Image (cartoon, helix red, strand yellow):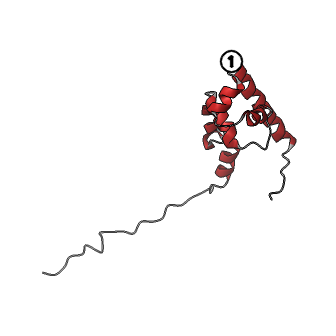
Amino acid sequence: MPTPHRPTLAVRRALQKLGLDIRDARRHRGLPAEIVAGRAFTSRPTLRRVDAGHHGVSIGVYAAVLHALGLLDGVAALADPATDKVGTAMAAARLPKHTRLKRQPETGSSATAATPD
């Protein structure tokens, strides 16, 4: 049996905000919970847990609910390396300060010496 995971306060707050935002999006669209749960291939109790931002719900279920609401586009950009300022700065810090080009072997001068006929 896996060890129970207790996320940090910051994680719990972020998930609660996500859940509230999902619930508000569903309500603004005038969609009943039954319809959204059906479109997301999940149950109403699970959708209730999503609306509450429960950390035990899989990210796949969150993504399915967002897709059912037409909000999936933002999920793909969550950890996009192009917008990761910290990761980019750390990668740049690991780059060497100076580089030297390797010399190319000279071709042609001694290899093309005249051959006797």
**Residue at position x 87%, y 41% from top?**
9
Which quarter of the image is occupied by the N terminus? bottom right
Relative depth, front residue between 34 and 72:
34
Residue 13, image quadrant: top right
Up-down relation of residue 54 to residue 96 (above or below): above
The local crowd at label 1, few if under 14, some if 14 to 19, many if 20 or more residues have their Cα within 10 Å, is few
Judge whether 37 appears above or below 92 on screen: above
**x and y, in percent, of residue 56 in the image:** 78, 44
Q: Residue furthest left?
A: 117
What x and y, as percent, mark residue 50? 75, 35
Q: Which residue is mark 1?
A: 30
Q: Return the x and y of residue 104 as percentages of the image width and height.
A: 41, 66
Instruction: Locate residue 105, reporting x and y percent.
Output: 39, 69
Q: Nearer the viewer, residue 86 or 61?
A: 61
Image quadrant containing the C terminus? bottom left
Q: Amino acid at mark 1?
A: Gly
Give the left or right position of residue 67, taking residue 113 as reference. right
Q: Locate residue 8: give its quadrant.
A: top right
Q: Nearer the viewer, residue 68 or 105?
A: 68
Foreground pick, 2 / 113: 2
Which image quarter: residue 68? top right
Residue positioned 70% across, 18% down in the render: 28
Q: How many marks?
A: 1
Report the residue at 29% width, 74% height from top: 111
Q: Is residue 44 left or right of residue 83?
A: right
In what element is the residue under mark 1? loop
Q: Determine whether 35 is above or below 99 in the image.
A: above
